[in-house]
Image: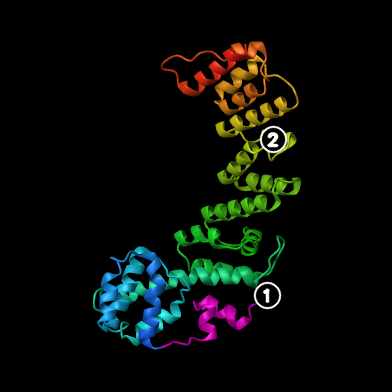
């Protein structure tokens, strides 16, 4: 069920990282600082790190370390292979927990910066190590996720979905109705989960479609409507699925793509669009669908006449003029 021991879970809850549990081995202070500077080079220009390198080269290691960290926490950046416990140990070795040089609030800001990253790392590690199904009732696991999320700011939570593996994303998605999270965070998680599933499966099969439909009806997430509209554009839905969506989706973007989808289906089946259908597509601004029909010679004579020359001040004149010229060439 789980890869984490009880001791490790408790450490995560109180704010320690998995690396803290396993212990830390530090090289000499100078070597450690040199490594930290090297790992941070990709984040800044040479000019931005010029002062840091100057202090380091003149054996002012405390000033070099403080200057480096100030650059990092001021920009909200983290170097590769970041382990806050090691950075904090070096800061203590330099005495920066007691006295600083450049910023009197350095130690507070340093810890807030490190803790923000640690919170992300801890919940990601936990979500990777567990397994949750939709009907899971493991209150301990849900409780731990809630405690770890509570340590994160909303901005951090909103970025979490982009840092999770498919497995971790699936775990928090399956616990979405039991985990205490902001509605925007939940929408991000749901959007990322279904987006990943579509990429994985290459289509929207009936079970996945039904699950998306259920989630939309329950929460009305706009992001799910966006996924479905994109699927229509790519012809990844069936006509029956689109007709089912028409029962409760009525936004202009959806209506436009639904009509365009049905238009392409008619064209592929050998039908020709009549004047009423052309006028409706013009009204919906589904110009790409009309262009598709023209390219396939799938507009009736009356339909071609409905593609009139736009006036000089008419909206979308350029694309309407292109459609008009193409229609005139065919009539």
Which sits earlier in the primary sequence, circle 1 or circle 2?
Answer: 1
**331 or 99, which is in the foreground?**
331
Instruction: Using the numbered discs, state the Cα–Cα distance from disc 1 to disc 2 in whole angstroms.
Output: 41 Å
Percent across and percent down for residue 180 are 56, 61
314 relative to 137, above or below: above
**Secondary element at image label 1:** loop
The mark found on residue 2 in the picture is 1
At 47% across and 66% down in the image, what residue appears?
A: 152
Figure quadrant of the C terminus: top right
Left or right of residue 46, residue 13 in this image: right
**278 or 194, which is in the foreground?**
278
146 relative to 96, above or below: above
Left or right of residue 102, residue 265 in this image: right
Q: Is residue 72 magenta?
A: no
**186 or 253, which is in the foreground?**
253
- Per the image, the residue denoted by label 2 is 242
Q: Residues within 10 Å of mark 1 (few under 14, many from 20)?
A: few
Q: Give the magenta-colored segment's residue range.
A: 4-27
Percent across and percent down for residue 94 are 32, 85
Left or right of residue 289, residue 204 in this image: right
**Secondary element at image label 2:** helix
Percent across and percent down for residue 285 are 54, 25
Q: Dividing the picture into quarters, in which one does residue 216 lie? A: top right
At 61% across and 32% down in the image, what residue appears?
A: 257
Q: Is residue 26 magenta?
A: yes
Q: Residues within 10 Å of mark 2 (few under 14, many from 20)?
A: many
31 relative to 106, above or below: below
The reply to whether residue 262 is in sight is yes
């Amino acid at each position: 069920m789980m890869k984490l021991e009880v001791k490790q879970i408790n450490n995560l809850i109180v704010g320690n990282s998995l690396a803290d549990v396993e212990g830390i081995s530090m090289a000499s202070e100078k070597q450690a600082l040199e490594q930290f500077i090297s790992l941070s080079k990709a984040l800044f220009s040479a000019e931005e790190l010029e002062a840091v390198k100057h202090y380091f080269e003149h054996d002012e290691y405390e000033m070099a370390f403080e200057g480096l960290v100030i650059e990092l926490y001021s920009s909200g950046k983290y170097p590769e292979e970041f382990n806050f416990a090691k950075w904090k140990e070096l800061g203590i070795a330099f005495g920066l927990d007691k006295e600083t040089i450049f910023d009197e609030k350095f130690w507070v800001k340093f810890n807030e910066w490190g803790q923000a990253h640690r919170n992300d790392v801890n919940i990601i590690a936990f979500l990777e190590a567990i397994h949750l199904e939709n009907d899971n009732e493991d209150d301990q696991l849900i409780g731990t996720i809630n405690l770890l999320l509570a340590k994160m700011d909303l901005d951090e939570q909103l970025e979490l979905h982009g840092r999770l593996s498919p497995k971790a994303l699936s775990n928090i998605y399956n616990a979405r109705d039991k985990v205490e999270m902001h509605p925007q965070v939940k929408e991000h998680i749901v959007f990322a989960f279904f987006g990943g599933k579509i990429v994985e499966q290459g289509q929207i099969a009936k079970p996945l479609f039904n699950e998306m439909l259920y989630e939309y009806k329950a929460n009305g997430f706009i992001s799910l409507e966006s996924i479905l509209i994109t699927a229509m554009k790519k012809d990844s839905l069936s006509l029956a699925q689109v007709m089912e969506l028409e029962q409760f989706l009525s936004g202009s973007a959806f209506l436009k793509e639904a009509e365009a989808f049905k238009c392409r289906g008619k064209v592929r089946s050998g039908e020709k669009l009549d004047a009423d259908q052309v006028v409706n597509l013009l009204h919906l601004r589904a110009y790409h669908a009309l262009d598709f029909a023209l390219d396939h010679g799938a507009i009736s004579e009356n339909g071609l006449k409905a593609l009139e020359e736009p006036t000089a001040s008419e909206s979308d004149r350029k694309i309407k003029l292109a459609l008009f010229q193409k229609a005139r060439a065919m009539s």
